[in-house]
Image: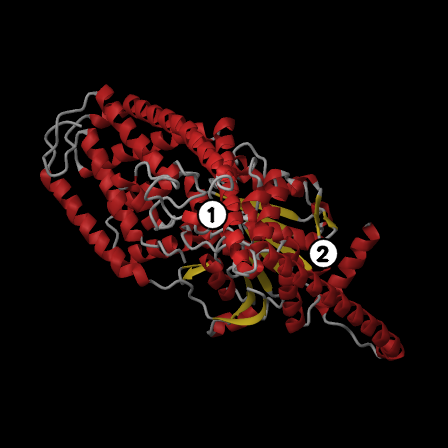
Amino acid sequence: MQSGADPRDFSDLGARIADTLWKLRRAASVEVGCSVKRAVWSCGKTTLYRYLPLTGSDVAVRAAKHARPILICFALVNRPYILDLQPDRSLVRRLLEAGHTVYLVDWGDAGDSERCTDLEDYLERHLAGCVAHVLEAHGLPALDLLGVCQGGVLSLCYTALHPRQIANLVTLTTPVDFHTTDNLLSKWVRGLDVDLVCATGNVPGEVLNGLFLALSPVRLAQQKYVRLLAAGADQRAVEDFVRMEKWIFDSPPQAAAALAQFVRWFYQENRLLHGTLEIGGRAVRLRDIRQPVLNLYATQDHIVPPAAAAAMEHCIGSEDYESCAIDTGHIGMYVSRAAREAIPTRITSWLRARA
Amino acid sequence: MSSGFRPEAAFVSAAEHFFDLMKSFGAQPGAGGAAAADPAKLAGSLASQFEQWLRATQSAGPWFSPGAGGGSGPAGIAAAFSPGAFGQGPFNPGAGAWPFGPLPQGSGAGTPPEGQRSWELITQLAQVQAQLATHWHEIATSAASQFAARLGSLASGPPTLQSALKVYELWVDCAEAAYGATVRKDDFAGLQSQLANLSAALLVEQRKHAETLARAFGLPTRNEVDALYGQIKELRRQVAALGEGRATAGVHQKAQRQGPQRKAARRKGAQRPAAARKTVSAARARKRRT
């Protein structure tokens, strides 16, 4: 830097910091989740929600075209409200607008009584209960399943184990190959003694937050705040920012047994890819998935690298497989401008063709 | 929601850090700019700042809360950025909260010979953190030298807010590149795992001592409670299996009773919904294929 800086430029910066800080404080109590939903079933801490249809004649007409409901299975490690963050950033809302009947699985917070809850429980009691409820409510033999991130992995397992109940499967940022060379998270946990770590009990959400931030600390813990400052964001933009922050730092605690299994079976042993995974004594083979599959993933994902998701193509048994790479990052898949339009449109048109 | 959710604290901390970096770059906010920094001096100053930041925020790994009581939310991170946070590892005075639960202190922490194993683990943890420190140094030095080499034309001309932000973006790119190159190495990944394993082992060890006390007061231990949960889970499984057995038997009986009625209905042309027909025929097709 040379001398001759305009002092006003930097004094403006001071004023801008004060202004952004004031807006951040005002935004502290911002609400998340925008669509109206009703709890329709529960098991332990897991709750199945049904989103109420949007009102309006257009929507009502389109609703008739999608008789089969969509069940969204989100990750255990994050909260699902990212899919319905605010009206203009809501995958759920876009699906409702397109006339879909939307259900969502919320796994809740694992407490001390869930320390022994394992993947079999989550799949065969909780998710199976949700699926059974939806099928019974609609008098249908099969539904459409939309799995997101780790929820996509669970959805793949469920579909392989219960193929008759799933008509179409959509996966969003879902890893299948956990040992791709660019998977830093996998590399870090490869040497973890999961039994020992989980012997200490449920793993708090803060640990997961720390882990995700440590993947790219300067960008995630500093740069985004400086960019907010530089953008001179208005109150609405600051509120959007705070909603995202709220979600990022709102990871639920993880049931010790399920987390131990997930880390060992998927991250350490890559069983899903190798076809050696067993849940509840039953083999989970991706080649048993014969229903249509739409696989959506991000090209700049630092948590689920694109190669980890794209590997699905070579493993599943479906002859009707489609993939779509979106040019964004992991969280961008839920909230970025590109994804906000591209993803719901793609899902809706793909499902409509297979209704 | 993390109790440490305070984005404004993280924002203030990041802004302060931005100001500090600007000072290092030679643009003194409010002072009308400064003379161009010597590249070698600049690299040295940046490396030192960045290394301190890495030690404060990353030394404990993701397995600990980085800030005193703040959790790993923005506020926790902000607390970790403060100068006083340097050197506050989880086993140093003023350490942040242990995310797995409270670490027993005093008599709960055990005394020799019971506490011997705990002290061994603490020593090993300190060794791992010392090894990690060499990586922080490597990352910081590499980031600073990359930055000094790439700064070039960005440093010319009078500093404006826009040019300062460009310089800052370059710094972030260099810092992330240097960090990414090191943390992907096998030895670094091994240290991360060791850190987590040792931390967990220490907690398990200290919990043993705490449970000794719990037993003295007739309180159930964690293992006993877990065993009970295990039994409840097994019973639940058995009940579910019994329920399924009953339901299956019921369906068989119903099918036997309804057999003649169904045939009659089919003769009358009764049909299932289209979606059901389609799925059933798809399932049959799959069955035939297999």
**Residue nearest the viewer, comparing B107 with B125:** B107
- State the residue position of label 2: A163
Same chain letter for marks 1 and 2: yes
Q: Residues within 10 Å of mark 2 (few under 14, many from 20)?
A: some
Query: Which mark is nearer the camera, 1 or 2?
Result: 1
Helix, strand or loop at label 2? It is helix
Q: Position of residue B16 (x, y in %)?
A: 22, 42
Q: Is residue A106 above or below residue B142?
A: below
**Residue nearest the viewer, comparing B24 with A32:** B24
Instruction: Say left or right for B276 vs B212.
Output: right
Indicate the quadrant where residue B77 lies.
Answer: top left
Question: Which residue occupies 50% across, 54% down?
Answer: B213
Helix, strand or loop at label 1? It is helix
Question: Which residue occupies 21% across, 29% down?
Answer: B25
**Residue nearest the viewer, comparing A352 with A38:** A38
- State the residue position of label 1: A208
Amino acid type shown at disc 2: Pro
Q: Residues within 10 Å of mark 1 (few under 14, many from 20)?
A: many
Q: Position of residue A72 (x, y in %)?
A: 56, 59
Question: Which residue occupies 64% across, 69% down?
Answer: A133
